[in-house]
Image (cartoon, rainbow, N blue to C red):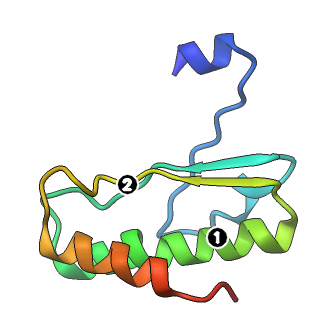
């Protein structure tokens, strides 16, 4: 990610299956670019693509992050568990 670092963008990586709260401190924008990948089962897809995303939105809101950008693969190869999680996230209320 040298391109972004050369532009003065601080990159923070975090594990959505671990405590990732620290990644949200002292940032003004979160770019959520995560996914469980095409080779995992539905359980990992739900944990990462749905629950991890919902928790990320909620943490950003709680901590006061100004912008939250979510990247999605929708429109490429449609994998049923991934599509289901994307649709669930769009309908999920922020806590």
Residue assigned mark 1: 57
User: Residue 48 appears at what percent x and percent y?
Assistant: 39, 70
Q: Are marks 1 and 2 in contact (CB under 8 Å)?
A: no
Q: Residue furthest top?
A: 6
**Label 1 element class:** helix
Instruction: Please tell me which residue lies in front, 69 or 44.
Output: 69
User: Position of 87 compared to 37: left or right?
Assistant: right
Instruction: Please tell me which residue lies in front, 55 or 20.
Output: 55
What residue do we see at 17% from left, 66% from top? Answer: 40
User: Residue 45 appears at what percent x and percent y?
Assistant: 28, 73
Residue 72: mark in rendering: 2
Q: Quadrant of residue 12?
A: top right
User: Residue 55 appears at what percent x and percent y?
Assistant: 60, 76
What residue do we see at 55% from left, 77% from top? Answer: 54
Classify 76 as above or below 11. Answer: below
Classify 91 as above or below 72. Answer: below
Q: How many marks?
A: 2
Q: Tag 2 or tag 1, which sits nearer the N-term?
A: 1
Q: For the C terminus, give its image quadrant.
A: bottom right
Rate crowding at label 1 as few (under 14), some (14 to 19) or many (20 or more) other CA atoms within 10 Å: many
Classify 60 as above or below 93. Answer: above
What residue do we see at 51% from left, 22% from top? Answer: 1
- Between the C-alphas of marks 1 and 2, the distance is 15 Å
Instruction: Please tell me which residue lies in front, 1 or 71.
Output: 71
Instruction: Please tell me which residue lies in front, 59 or 14.
Output: 59
What residue do we see at 47% from left, 70% from top? Answer: 17
């Amino acid at each position: 990610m040298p391109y972004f670092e050369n532009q003065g963008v601080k990159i923070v990586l975090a594990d959505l299956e671990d405590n990732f709260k620290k990644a949200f401190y002292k940032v003004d924008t979160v770019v959520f670019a995560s996914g469980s990948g095409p080779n995992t089962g539905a359980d990992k897809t739900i944990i990462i693509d749905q629950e991890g995303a919902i928790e990320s939105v909620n943490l950003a809101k709680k901590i006061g992050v100004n912008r939250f950008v979510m990247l999605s693969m929708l429109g490429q190869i449609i994998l049923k568990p991934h599509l289901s999680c994307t649709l669930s996230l769009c309908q999920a209320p922020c806590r």
